[in-house]
Each structure stands twice: as C-alpha cells, then as structure tokens.
Amino acid sequence: MGIAVRDEGSKVTSNINVTPMVDVMLVLLIIFMVITPMLQNKVNVDLAKADNPTSMPDADKEDAIVVAVTRDGKVYLGQNITTDDQLGPKVRDMLTDKPGKEIFVRADARAQFRAVEDAIDAVRTAGVDKVGLLIQKREAGSTGGVI
C-alpha cells in the first residue's frame, strides 16, 4: 500500500485578476471626461432675457475674461470678488499678453444700472475696446413680464 499524494496546490494560481478593476477605472474615466466640461465655475446671476440675442461663442472659452455683476452690486472678475477701483488694473494685468481681447459682462437682470455702468467704465478705462454684454434667449411663449 502506498500513500496517495495529492498535488492540488500546484494548480492554484496566486495572480490577481486586474481586468475588472481596469474596466471600472475606464468607466470612471469616461464619466469624469463627460462631466468635467459641464461643470462651469461661474458666479450665479439671473441674466436679462431678450428675443433675438447675438451669439457670443467666445464667452464659453476657458480663457475668456468674464466680469459678473450680482443683484446686490458685487463685482466679480472670474470667480474672485473685486471692487470697481481694482477691476481696471486687474483687467489691464490680464490683458498684457493679449491685446485686442474682448471682455464679457454678465449682469443680473435686477442689478442696479449704476453698478453695471461702473464695471463697464472700469473695463473701458483699462484699455478694452470690445465689451460684450451676455444675456439669455427668452423662452418661446413667455412674455417675461412685458405686455
């Protein structure tokens, strides 16, 4: 009688199967690539509405310089809050390497006209010739309070 030796331990592989992990990582990568352009870091303002606005595709570019005026009169250059006194020099510094660039102004529909005018004046005194006012297209069928 002999002793039966079983050799089942040699059949077990100790390698980690990384294929499911790679699949999950690729799905997450695709999700982040799709969602990232949708995340726009802008100051929230309710833009004025118009029937036939002019399209300004340059305002959506990453290097666009956007000045926002909120309902309570605060002025933002990009995401940073600023004052009218600081706005002109900051814009001038941003445009040192980009002459002739257009500045876009996003003003709240209920913002005081004086605050918007002061922001535009500060940008114009910085040497900017092109200023674009951003508005929204009025939805079809809504009068927007106008009779």
Image: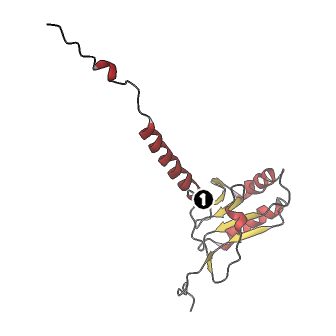
Quadrant of the rendered structure where residue 67 is?
Answer: bottom right
Considering only vertical position in the picture, is 128 above or below 147? above
Q: Quadrant of the C terminus?
A: bottom right
In this view, the residue farthest toward the bottom is 147
In this view, the residue farthest toward the front is 1
Question: Callout 1 environment at 10 Å: few (<14), some (14 to 19), or many (20+)?
Answer: some
Rendered location of residue 97, percent (x, y)? 84, 50
Task: From the image, tell me which residue sits under label 1.
Answer: 42
Rendered location of residue 52, percent (x, y)? 67, 82
Q: Amino acid at mark 1?
A: Lys
Q: Residue at image x 50%, y 45%?
A: 26
Rendered location of residue 103, percent (x, y)? 75, 63
Q: Does 110 sit left or right of 113 as displayed?
A: left
Q: Residue at image x 69%, y 59%?
A: 61
Q: Does 6 sit left or right of 58 as displayed?
A: left
Q: Nearer the viewer, residue 13 or 113?
A: 13
Rendered location of residue 70, percent (x, y)? 60, 65
Q: Nearer the viewer, residue 107 or 52?
A: 52
Secondary structure of the residue carrying tag 1 is loop
Considering only vertical position in the picture, is 50 above or below 134? below
Q: Quadrant of the N terminus?
A: top left
Q: Nearer the viewer, residue 3 or 70?
A: 3
Quadrant of the rendered structure where residue 126 is?
Answer: bottom right
